Image: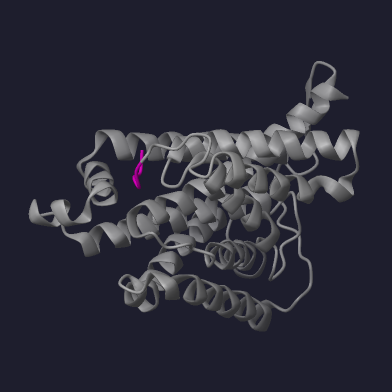
Amino acid sequence: MLLQALVSGVVLGSLFALLAVGLTLVYGVMEVPNFAQAGVITLAAYVMLWLNQTIGWPFWLAVAGGVLAGGVLSVLTERFAYRFVRTRPLAAPVVALGLLLVLDNSALELWGGDHVSLSPPYAGDVLYLGPTTLPAVGAAMILATVVALLALHLLLKHTRTGRAIRAVSQNPEAAAILGIRLERQYVIAFFISGILAGVAAFASGPMYAVFPYMAEEVLLNAFVVVILGGLGNVWGAVAGGLLLGILESLSAVYLSAAYQTTVGFTVLLLIIVLRPAGLFATGARRVA
């Protein structure tokens, strides 16, 4: 039972980590709490469904289209909303929540409120890992998270674009003096965050039903992970996501599934009281 709970916790933690990294990337660059990320995930999932089940695209091509749509939609939120609140930090949470409502209700108007299944070719398959089992959709979630985060790591550490993003997150004024175009880095950061949201839609869609408010609860957990890992700390978000996923899975097994979500907010309260900067804080606002 313990091993099965740990496996389930890694699956859930992978989703938390994927979402939290997108959130912490945007926060590290712009200090914006991007609540609209949940709406981007939802619309990306619906685009995948529409391309696959209505237009008739092959599943993997529809997934690619949905992931790209997530990136484009995220950039649009920055261009038409967030860019106007950079100098008004107190307005940012209100704008973010307003965007979330707009995106979720757009999905409701376009596709209705029914719960729909995103069914990949491997739906129903199960992997046997000794005494434990892992649904193929769970394995796909872990694999998608690993690939996405590895690609992000290579981008941030080994490309000129990645170095520019890190420079802007550490000191935007100095980065601008050195000739780095801040507007361009903001757009790139939001595009990457949207791509990660699209990957999250692909990973979570087969495990959970697709409906207009599918990502809101898990996004709250992702914000817990962002604080747990330390604001702006990408790898802290990964570690925090896995930790929270395992804790919630263990609580569901040994306490009750009713307490699973409560665990996340209990952890959040403890972190705020005992270590406000987060368990893996870097000591500065940065993307690391």
User: What is the image's colouring?
Assistant: one colour
Q: Looking at the image, can residue 234 be seen?
A: yes
Q: Is residue 213 above or below residue 253?
A: below
Q: Quadrant of residue 208?
A: bottom right
| Residue found at the far left of this picture | 178
The vertical placement of 151 against 218, above or below, is above
Q: Give residue 9's quadrant in the image.
A: top right
Q: How many marks?
A: 0
Q: Residue at x 62, y 67 (%)?
A: 46
Residue 268 in picture, x, y percent from top left: 64, 47
Q: In the image, 230: left or right of 191?
A: right
Queried whether the magenta region covers residue 193, the answer comes back as no
x and y, in percent, of residue 63 in the image = 55, 54
Q: Is residue 139 visible?
A: no
**Residue located 58% across and 68% down the image:** 39
**Residue lying at the far top of the rendered structure:** 130
Q: What type of secondary structure mainly makes up the magenta span?
A: loop
The magenta stretch is: 284-288
Residues 203 and 53: in front is: 203
Residue at point 26% right, 33% down? 158
Residue 181 % position (x, y): 16, 59
| Quadrant placement of the C terminus | top left
Furthest residue in direction bottom, as rendered: 109
**Quadrant for the N terminus in the image:** top right
Q: Is residue 61 positioned above or below 18 on the image?
A: below
Quarter of the image where one finds residue 163: top left
In the figure, is residue 35 to the left or right of 119?
left
Residue 176 percent coordinates (x, y): 13, 57
Who is closer to the viewer here, 121 or 286? 286
